[in-house]
Image: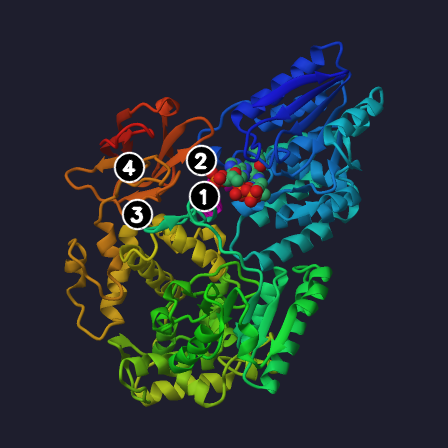
Amino acid sequence: MVDYSVKGQVALLEVNNPPVNALSTAVRTGLRDGIAKASKDPKVKAIIICGKGQTFPAGADIREFGQPPRAPWLIEVGDSIEASLKPVVAAIHGTCLGGGLEVSLFCHYRIAVKSARVGFPEVNLGLLPGAAGTQRLPRLVGLPVALDMITSGRHVTALDAKKYGILDELVAGDLINAAIKYAMSVVGKPLMERRLRYKQVPGADKAREVCEAAMAQVKRKYKGYEAPVECVRAVRASVDLPYADGIRMESELFKQLNASGQARAQQYAFFAERTVSRWSMPNGSYRTAKALPVKTTAVLGAGTMGTGIAVCLLSAGLPVILLEQNEKLLQNGLRTIKALMEGSVKLGKVPMEVAQKATTLLKPTLNYEDLKDVDLVIEAVFENLKLKREVFGKLDKICKPSALLCSNTSTLDIDLAATSRPDKVAGMHFFAPAYHMRLLENIYGTKTSFMVEEGANPYEIDQIMEDLGMPMGPFKVRDLSGIDIGWRITQEVAKSLGTTITKETKYLGGERYCGIGDDLYEKGRHGRKTGLGFYKYEKKGGKISTPDPDALDIIEAYRQRRGIVKCKISSQEVIERQMYSSINEGFKILEEGICTRPEDIDISWLYGFTFPKYLGGPMFYASRIGLQKVYERICYYHENFPLKQRDCKDLRRRGSSTSGVYTMYPALGVVINSYCDMTTDGGGWTWVFWEVAVDAATRCCWRSPPFFYGYVEVYGYVEVCRLCRGNDNLHLLLSNGESEMRFDMEDFNNNTRYLQYTTFTVGNETSRYLATLSGPSGNVGT
Ligand SMILES: CCC/C=C/C(=O)SCCNC(=O)CCNC(=O)[C@H](O)C(C)(C)COP(=O)([O-])OP(=O)([O-])OC[C@H]1O[C@@H](n2cnc3c(N)ncnc32)[C@H](O)[C@@H]1OP(=O)([O-])[O-]
């Protein structure tokens, strides 16, 4: 894991743990032993620590966080590096992150290539740098930079890192040769002043103001997140306490965070994000699919979504033809794109050169003929089926046969596009703002406005959801995406059902219908674009929202017209009704096979709706609350606030049976009672092989992802079972949310079948656990 060699008078410790050289137990051991060996070798005058392959260590091995910690601790390894009597140089390339950056801060010198990046991303995993990073970085760069880096988790370029004083030198050409030369140049120089533990934090006299301002900022910016708050506390200790006490405090705070549900959720989100990229469908998977080349694109419609999508494509360096139906709309769209590009440059999201190039890549047109050679067309016209069908008809005639014809529709059936090339037609639903959100997906939202109908205030609902960590409440989102868009969608839905919406419509397609949006629409309150929606804005297209008594009057008039008696809805109920209906919908999506893994749903929420990562996503959140409890509350809401037109009084009874109960809420109940399947990853490995016996009934709820790790809920006894592939073996992790049990499967590398049969105790209940593994050459067994 750490390759040791001596080049002339320099010992080279090369971390060799692909893919990212994570600081696993074996790597930590290798570094400790390498330093000891080099220290004893009289030929060696200096030591270099670097990474083999693509990067310097990118951090601790995240997969080890859920396991009992194993020595040597990173901080002990670091202490031995710092104590070395021979100079130690960190030679950095790739990403030097988290524990990797901590290792480099124990070194006496740090040099890097220009393309390298450094950072402390622990905060994104619900943690803080726990191997002296919070005590050593401030000593090197001062509080403001340290606080910014540690609380934001951002990656810093090598150029900036040199400016801040993190790096001593940037080198060009071969890194190892440059490092050897550099190491020899520092031999004999005093090391004491290079040992950060002995330094004072620069600007310590301003510590109080700086830390208080940072604390206020993280509380505002990262509402609900624990880690940024503890990061500030730990950094402050670098000034308030002697080094050793600061380290102790850092360690305490690290342990506290690591044991919290938030860290677990954020680490789950990290791996879930990687899991969902390994998609698989009946006719192929990420392994077999070949990407179609897209060199030229076109966007139809220069409204809010069309311009956003154009900015997204231009920012990726793709040429875009923007088509509109008349010159006025086209010019409006061009102005919007220019303003959005300028805004993105100001926010540092798009480099200036990219924005400048975008002006040459954008071609406006009113003529469909100009689209004949493009590889990809994204239609973003009004949500009107007739119009969309017309557009697709034209595109089908004009565009080359290989062109992909995509629709940004959020609601219409893509199969209705009616072209001669259905295999080249797809839905491509961007989330607003399209140039900012990382998700291209479609998961249906919540049923919030029911609550407003019953008496809740939209501003309170938004505040509650924002306090939970959502960047925008659901009503601000509706104003952003356009109340007129929602209105058009429901008109189309009604049309497709052969009906029309009136002031009295209470159900549409058998589901409860809320007409508050229609009333706002009729008053010209179309959201941000008109300066009025649920909120009032400082101008048309403005961003500063303020509650508007006129909107509340419209809502109250609506209630009176409908004879609805206003009732009080508590914060807890707002959260439950928002979250649980989404969770229920998530289980329905799994049950219907639209998604195969809970991670797919969670990632859609994390990136589509900016769901707070510290909760992990709605499905993960459900697992933490406990499915039994979630299910009971769903039953309660279903009985008291039915979303469907028909009677649902017998839900509780039916929900406990395995026969399908497909009304709005009970999907969860159905999935609770399903069994976990065996699956294969398409590459010859079989991964899911468990059966958990809980008395007579086996109750698993989540299907395991067909890849290297997954989660399975075992109702009533164990919360999470996780199958992980470590670097050199396979293990299974069982957890009840507080403690975890690990089962190693050491025969994995020998491709032999392995049977593990054991008993374990969780919450005073003893269950039997049986797991069987087969390698590529074996058969699946149970
Ligand atoms: C007390 C000590 C305190 C220290 C705390 C820390 O250091 S906290 C840590 C602080 N560090 C961080 O938070 C850095 C987290 N990592 C990253 O941000 C990115 O991975 C990257 C920028 C390093 C590379 O991006 P990229 O797009 O080139 O690649 P990619 O993202 O697709 O990953 C490739 C594979 O590597 C895997 N893997 C990655 N990192 C780790 C890890 N640390 N561990 C284990 N595994 C890790 C990843 O799961 C994936 O595996 P898969 O799915 O193929 O089986």
- Amino acid type shown at disc 4: Gly
Could you say where residue 683 lies in the image, as x and y percent from the top left? 37, 37
Task: Pick whichever of labels 1 and 2 is earlier in the sequence.
Answer: 2
Q: Earlier in the sequence, mark 3 or mark 1?
A: 1
Q: Choose between 138 and 204: the one closer to the eye.
A: 138
Separation (CA) of disc 2 from disc 4: 19 Å
Mark in the foreground, 3 or 2: 3
**What residue is at 60 percent from the left and 68 percent from the top?**
320
Disc nearer the start of the sequence (2/4): 2
The residue to which callout 1 is attached is 264
Residue shown at the point (27%, 58%) measured from the top left: 592
Dot 4 falls on a residue whose secondary structure is loop
Circle 1 packing at 10 Å, graded few (<14), some (14-19), many (20+), is many
> Mark 3, residues whose alpha carbon is within 10 Å: few (<14), some, or many (≥20)?
many
Placement of the N terminus among the 4 image quadrants: top right
Q: Which residue is mark 4?
A: 763
Local secondary structure at mark 2: loop
Residue placed most toward the observer, 441 or 46: 441
Marks 3 and 2, Cα distance to the nearest angstrom? 20 Å
Residue for badge 3: 702
Disc 4 Cβ-to-ligand 1 distance below 8 Å: no
Image position of 732 with respect to 371: above or below? above
Can residue 270 be found in the magenta stretch? yes
Ligand 1 lies in which image quarter?
A: top right
Based on the displayed image, in which of its 4 quarters is residue 514 positioned?
Answer: bottom left
* Residue contact at pointers 4 and 1, CB within 8 angstroms: no
Q: Which residues are magenta?
A: 257-272
Sequence order check, earlier mark of 4 and 3: 3
